[in-house]
Image: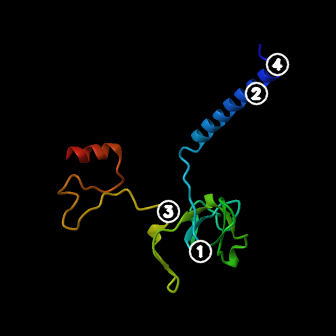
Amino acid sequence: MVSKSKFIKYFHEKVKNQIQAQVEKIAHFKNKGKRVRSFNEGDLVWLHLRKERFPNLRKSKLSPRGDGPFQFIKKINNNSYQLDLPAEYGVHPTFNITDLVPFVGTFDEEDDHQDLRANPLQGGGDDMTPTSPSSSASTSPSLHQGPITRSMMKKIHMGL
C-alpha cells in the first residue's frame, strides 16, 4: 500500500505538470503571430503620434499619424526605447516599441529631405488604374478613370 504522503507528492507533481503544460500551450497560442522588433543605436524610426500623448499635434482626423524620422538613442528594455526628440514636442523621449516603426528609405539631414513613400504610417497612392500617354480610356476599355470596384475588376478581366 502507498503511503499518504507519497500519494500527495505524486498528485501534486502531476497537477503541477498539467498546469505547466497548459501555460505553455496558451503562451504558444498567444505569441503565434507576434513580431519581434528591435532597434540598434543610430537607427531611424517613425514615431506614432497618439492623441493622448500629443493632443496638439493630433487635433484633426486629417493630421498625420506619424512623425519623424527620429534617431534611436538608447534601449531601456525590450519594450521601451529612447529617441532623439526635439524639445518643442514637450514630452519625455522614451516610447513603447508599439509606437515606433522602422524607417525604410533615404533621409538627408542637410537638406531636410526625406523619401515620404518610405513612411509606413502614411496612406499610399490612389485606386486609379495607371494610364499611358499613348493610349486613352476611349480606345481601350480596360483603362478607365475612378476607383476600381469588384464589378469594374470583373469587366477588366473579361476584357469588356
Which residue: 67% across, 60% down?
A: 51
Q: Amino acid at mark 1?
A: Gln
- The residue where tag 3 is placed is 120
Label disc, if present, on residue 71 of the rendered structure: 1
Residue at the extreme front of the image, as rendered: 1
Q: Residues within 10 Å of mark 1 (few under 14, many from 20)?
A: some
Asked whether the beta carbons under mark 3 and mark 4 sit within 8 Å of each other, the answer is: no
Can residue 117 be seen from the camera position used here? yes
Residue 39 point in image, percent of width and height: 57, 66
Earlier in the chain: of badge 4 and badge 1, it is: 4
| SS at circle 2 | helix
Residues tagged 4 and 1 counted as in contact (Cβ below 8 A)? no
Q: Is residue 118 above or below residue 33?
A: below
Q: SS class of the residue under badge 4?
A: helix
Q: Nearer the viewer, residue 58 or 79?
A: 79
The mark lying in front, picked from 3 and 4, is 4
Toward the bottom, the furthest residue is 110
The amino acid type of the residue labelled 4 equals: Lys
Q: Earlier in the sequence, mark 1 or mark 3?
A: 1
Spatial distance from mark 4 to mark 1, Cα to Cα? 64 Å
Among the two numbered marks 3 and 2 on one chain, the one whose residue lies closer to the N terminus: 2
Q: Position of residue 64 (x, y in %)?
A: 56, 65
Q: CA distance from mark 1 to mark 2?
A: 52 Å
Residue where numbered disc 2 is placed: 12
Mark closer to the observer (1, 2): 2
- How are the colours assigned in the image? rainbow
Report crowding for label 4: few under 14, some 14 to 19, many 20 or more residues within 10 A (C-alpha): few
Foreground residue among 143 and 69? 69
Where the N terminus falls, by quadrant? top right
Instruction: State whether residue 63 appears in this view.
Output: no
